[in-house]
Image (cartoon, helix red, strand yellow):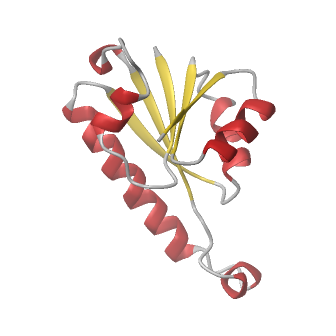
Amino acid sequence: MRILVLAREAVDAARVRAGLPGEDLSDAEVLVVAPADEQSTLQFWMSDSDDAIAEASDRGDEVADELRSEGARARTETGEADPILAVRDALATFPADRILVFGDEELAQQVRNSVDVEVTAVS
């Protein structure tokens, strides 16, 4: 199974497993997409995204490390600040079977409306 994890926050392997009942992470190929959220409007207009990119990269690495400890083949990708765009970009090179969105049912619905992949919201 190929799983795209949209990591707008750090999540542990237990939360990922909760979104995949009956699935074994050791059989999974996982792409962790961590959007580089801009910190402020000023940073956005000044194109000062270095801090946001570094934070997203660290967050993605943390999630991927968690998943690798469970046997998953996981890698990370820092995505655009817009999570929908980040997911679409990732799907261009990673044909996921399922997308997991954590803690945001509204965002999960927006992703469902934007892509043709099963999307699971995990609280």
Q: Relative to 97, does residue 99 appear above or below in the rendering? A: below
Relative placement, left or right, of 76 versus 38 is left
Quadrant assignment, res 18? top left
Residue at the right extreme of this rendering: 113
Q: Relative to 113, does residue 53 appear above or below in the rendering? A: below
Residue 40 spot, x, y in % from top left: 65, 82
Residue at the location (69% across, 40% down)?
89
Residue 2 spot, x, y in % from top left: 49, 19
In the rendered image, the quadrant that contains the N terminus is top left
Relative placement, left or right, of 118 versus 14 is right
Q: Relative to 101, does residue 119 appear above or below in the rendering? A: above
Residue 51 spot, x, y in % from top left: 50, 76
Residue at the location (38% across, 33% down)?
16
Residue in front for this viewpoint, 54 or 122: 122
Residue at the left extreme of this rendering: 69
Relative placement, left or right, of 11 versus 106 is left
Numbered circles on residues, count: 0
Relative placement, left or right, of 112 versus 70 is right
Residue at the location (52% across, 54% down)?
8
Residue at the location (71% across, 56% down)?
82
Residue 27 spot, x, y in % from top left: 32, 13
Quadrant assignment, res 19? top left
